[in-house]
Amino acid sequence: MDDRDREPPEDGYVGRVLAGRYAIVKKLNQGGMGAIYLAIQRPLDRPVALKVLLRSQINDATAVKRFEKEARSVSRLTHPHVVVLFDFGETETGELYIAMEYLQGTSLRDQLNAPPHVISWDRSLHIMRGVTSALTAAHAAGIIHRDLKPENVMLVARGGDVDFAKVLDFGLARSMEPEQLSPITQRDVIPGTPAYLAPERAN
């Protein structure tokens, strides 16, 4: 299987200019709620990671609220180990998008999957210091991530550091501000990825 076989399927966005300023170059990934594209922001010629709510979710009020909540959560965090949000908006045809910094690196999941399938203690400690620093800042802002897993940690080069951790995907985050406490998650549904839930949440 070559790299082309692993490319996410195209869905009509590649080649478009979204919101009049984001020229979509290629699809990077897709989750249950949104797809991520590499786009060029005009007129700055800046590469961005553009997350677009899936068309199948546009009429789902819960998905829309969750997407908007992700944008609000990330916009409140200014921290070197948290992905930077540039823009959030809606097109004239109702397409919701989030423009974030484009990170060139590998996910922690890809690092764990690569031979020899282990990461040294010193390297692990360094990566986790970055991750916990990001979570500390989020908690100080009243935001709980709720879906921390290797897929949501990117390792990028910053200066001489080739394992600079960036925490992504605040789509399931919960704000602890009183006005934001009305739940989006359905009753009896535990948000997050089961393999990475804290034991007390899985009971």
Image: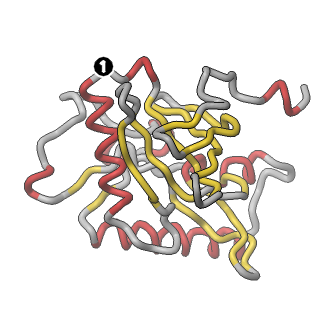
Disc 1 target residue: 59
Q: Secondary structure at mark 1?
A: loop
| Residue in front for this viewpoint, 101 or 173 | 101
46 shown above or below 40:
below
Residue 97 position (above or below residue 46): above
The image shows residue 184, relative to residue 115, as above or below, that is: above
Mark 1: few/some/many CA within 10 Å (<14, 14-19, 20+): few
Residue extending furthest toward the bottom:
160
Give the quarter of the figure containing the N terminus. top right
> What residue occupies the far left of the structure in this picture?
178
Number of numbered discs present?
Answer: 1
Query: In the picture provided, is 83 more to the left or to the right than 176?
Result: right
The amino acid beneath tag 1 is Asn
**Residue beneath the point at 27% across and 69% down:** 141
Q: Nearer the viewer, residue 175 or 191?
A: 175
Q: Which residue is nearer to you in this view: 126 or 178?
A: 178
The image shows residue 111 at horizontal and vertical percentages of: 74, 53
